[in-house]
Image (cartoon, rainbow, N blue to C red):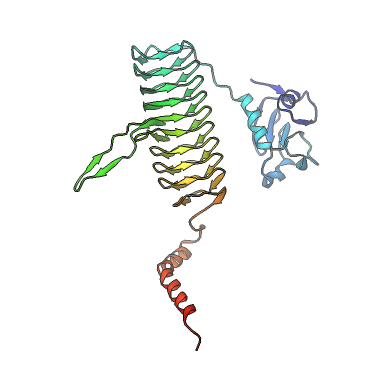
Amino acid sequence: MTMYTLGDIAARFGLELRGDPATPIRGVATLANATAGQLGFLANPRYRAQIASTGAAAIVLRAADADGCKAATLIADDPYVAFARIAALYDKIPAAAAGAHPSAIIGAGARIAASASIGAFCVIDADAEVGDGAMLGPHCIVGRGCRIGAQARLVARVTLVQDVTLGKRVLVHPGAVIGADGFGIAFAKDHWEKVPQLGGVVIGDDSEIGANTTIDRGALGDTVIEEDVRLDNQIQIAHNVFIGAHTAMAGCSAVAGSARIGRYCLIGGGAGILGHLEIADRVTVTAMSLVTHSLREAGEYSSGTPIQSNRQWRRNAARFKHLDDFVRRSGAARREPES
């Protein structure tokens, strides 16, 4: 069992300690579920009442919330960030042995670093490259022209279809498909013609791609995900999309072709961004919103209507179709001269 003392943790992360530095911490938990030997945290004020009843040996919180706390405390300007860093001490991924599993199929010309780990039933194309310390879990496929950077990790069943470049320390979760054809079709009078997808995908260092997320390769240029981008599960990124560094997108969001998203953006779950639009740096799009035009200034944006009873929604929806006529009649009434 991994164990650190409160003194170890405070010194490692530069936190103010109020309590016994020799207190052992063997794990982390929520305030509601923490037991002796575990560390909890308070980031959201709505859970402050749990401080009095928690079984945690210590709590990470802001100085303003520490008064009256009976447990030992670690004072942080941002308790959630501090807790994330501390929790990483207890998240030990088993080291994978260097080399390839006997069931892996590796093309004769593939360039595999001696320190890389290739799991069971992986298939690696002869034109692919796997960098130092990279880890490929079972059933991963690395296609033609793909490059995997040092210390990158493909957890399991990840497919890199073609011309995909992963930077250093990129983490890709199970089921992700990167580098498949973008949705390029042209209508020729009475049938569809497929538009060849000739670009690739470039993903920057320290990015994370969620389970079953798909990122299409570009039609001509590349689809680009800059460094430290975090994509949740089941996200669709279409061809030639650009996502700036440090942006995070929640599950089931989707971005249509050739859209450009700036740096430090937050895209809520289920949100959609139409093609060829531009999103400025530091934009937040709330969950289930549909972005239909470019957002050129930083800020928070939403669309849609708040949740309401179905009966109320049906009444409002019925009136919505009369809105244009109402506006026209109101405008006409304002323009009529007074008698």
Look at the picture and state if 130 lies above or below 255: above
Image quarter hosting the N terminus: top right
Q: Is residue 73 left or right of residue 311?
A: right
- Tally of numbered tags: 0
Position in image of residue 273 (x %, y %): 44, 47
Q: Residue at x 53, y 16 (%)?
A: 95
Q: Is residue 181 visible?
A: yes
Residue toward you, 56 or 194: 194
Q: Residue at x 50, y 16 (%)?
A: 133
Position in image of residue 306 (x %, y %): 52, 58
Q: Residue at x 36, y 19 (%)?
A: 123
Position in image of residue 252 (x %, y %): 45, 42
Residue toward you, 262 or 36: 262
Residue toward you, 26 or 193: 193
Look at the picture and state if 322 lies above or below 70: below
Position in image of residue 121 (x %, y %): 37, 18
**Image quarter of residue 40:** top right
Q: Residue at x 41, y 39 (%)?
A: 236
**Image quarter of residue 235:** top left
Q: Is residue 157 visible?
A: no
Look at the picture and state if 336 lies above or below 319: below
Give the farthest residue toward the left: 190
